[in-house]
Image (cartoon, rainbow, N blue to C red):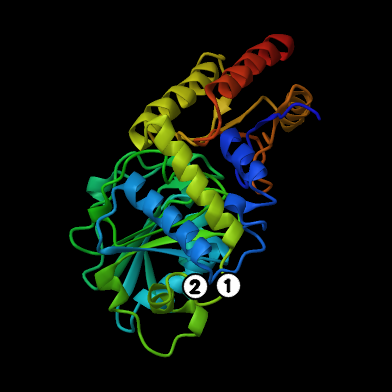
Amino acid sequence: MRDRVFNFSAGPAAIPTPVLEKARDELLSFEGSGMSIMEMSHRSARFEEVLAKAADGLRELLALPEHFHILFIQGGPTLQFSMIPMNLLPPGQVADHIVTGAWGAKAAIEAGKFGTIRRAFDGSASGFTTVPDLGELSFSPTAAFVQYTSNETIDGVQFHEELDAGGIPVVCDMSSDILSRPIDADKYGLIFAGAQKNIGPSGVTVVIIREDLIERVPDGLPYLLDYREYVRQGSMPNTPNTWGIYLIGLVCDWLREQGGVDVIEVRNRRKAAILYDVIDSSEGFYTGHADRGSRSLMNVTFRLPSAEIDERFCIEAEAAGLDGLRGHRSVGGVRASIYNAMPESGVAALADFMSDFMHRNG
C-alpha cells in the first residue's frame, strides 16, 4: 500500500491516524458483536452507548454545562443556515449577521428567506481579508440572535476573541475551528459545526443549543427541521449517521489522549506560525490573503506571483506527498488546512517544500 500523504484538504479533512486504525480494527465486528457499527440497529443498547460516548466526549472537551443540548443532525452545516431562522427568528424581530467570508454570506442570504436580517458587519468590500473589532460592533435592539462564523475556511480569516452580544443570544458556525481551542460556552446560545474538519467524517452536523432557546421554537415546523424533535428523541427522530457518530467518539478519545483542547491550541498556534513565518520572510514571493491580525490558525491562505505558478506549486506539492493545497474554486490561490489531525511533521514538510520551491522559482 502506498504511504499515506499529508492531507491539507479543507474538508472532508484528515482524521487522526489512530482513530482510523481503531475503526479499521473494529470494522467487521464492533466490540465482539459480530457486526459492523454500520450494520447495527440505531435502537440497540450498544449503539445508544456509542451515541452517549460521542455526546459525553464533546461535553467534556468543550466544558459544556448541562443546560446545553448536544444534537447530531444530518444535512451539513448548510442546512443549519435554514433551520436556525426557522426555529429562532420570530416575526417582528431581526437577526444580526456578522459576515466575514463566503459561509457567513451564504448564511445571511438563507436566513433572509425566513425573516428580516441585518448585516452588522460585511467584509465583502475588502475581499474578506479581516474580521471586525468586536468592541466597535452594534446590534439591533430587536435582534433575536447575532450570528457569525468563527473561522472562514475559504478566505482564511478567524476571530481570535469570542463575541459578547450584551445578552442577545449568539449563534456561531464553528465548523472549521471547533475543538481547536477552549471556548466559554456561556457566551453562546447555539453552536453548530460540520464534523468533517475537526470532529470526524462528513455526514454529521453537531448542534449545541441552550435550553432556553429550545423553548422559543414555534409550532408547525416540518418534523425533521424542528430542534425540539432532536431533543425529545435523543438525536434520533430518524436513523442517524451511526458510523459518523461512532467516529466522533473515537476522535474525542484521541483528543483526550493528546491532553485536551488546551494542549491542542498550543500545538495549532505553533503549526500556523511555521507557515506564516515562511510567507512573511519570502519578500513577497508568497502573499497571505488575510490581514495579520485576522489570520486563521486552521486555514492558511496565500498566493504566489501568478496563477500559473500557483498551479505548478500545487502539482509539485502533490507529487511530494502534500495533498489538497489548491484554494477554493471560487477564489483560487493556495490553502493549507492544518486542523487538529495535521501533525507538526506535515506542517514542517510543507514549510520545507515552500522554501525549496521559492528558491527554485523566485
Horizontally, residue 203 falls left or right of residue 253, namely: right
Graded by Cα atoms within 10 Å as few (under 14), some (14 to 19) or many (20 or more), the crowding at tag 1 reads few
Q: Are marks 1 and 2 in contact (CB under 8 Å)?
A: yes
Question: In the structure shown, which secondary structural element does the residue marked by tag 1 occupy?
Answer: loop
Specify the amino acid type for callout 2.
Met
At 54% from the left edge and 35% from the top edge, which residue is drawn? 341
Horizontally, residue 226 falls left or right of residue 356, namely: left
Graded by Cα atoms within 10 Å as few (under 14), some (14 to 19) or many (20 or more), the crowding at tag 2 reads some
| Location of the C terminus (image quadrant) | top right
At 80% from the left edge and 28% from the top edge, which residue is drawn? 2
Separation of disc 1 and disc 2 at Cα? 6 Å
| Location of the N terminus (image quadrant) | top right
Horizontally, residue 152 falls left or right of residue 303, namely: left
Q: Which residue is mark 2?
A: 236
At 67% from the left edge and 43% from the top edge, which residue is drawn? 24
Q: Which residue is mark 1?
A: 239
Residue 154 visible in the snapshot: yes
Residue 128 visible in the snapshot: no
Residue closest to the eye, 290 or 320: 320
Specify the amino acid type for callout 1.
Thr
The picture quadrant where one finds residue 144 is bottom left
Most distant residue in the top direction: 359
Residue closest to the eye, 291 or 17: 17
Estimate the x, y position of residue 4 in percent, counting from the top left: 71, 29
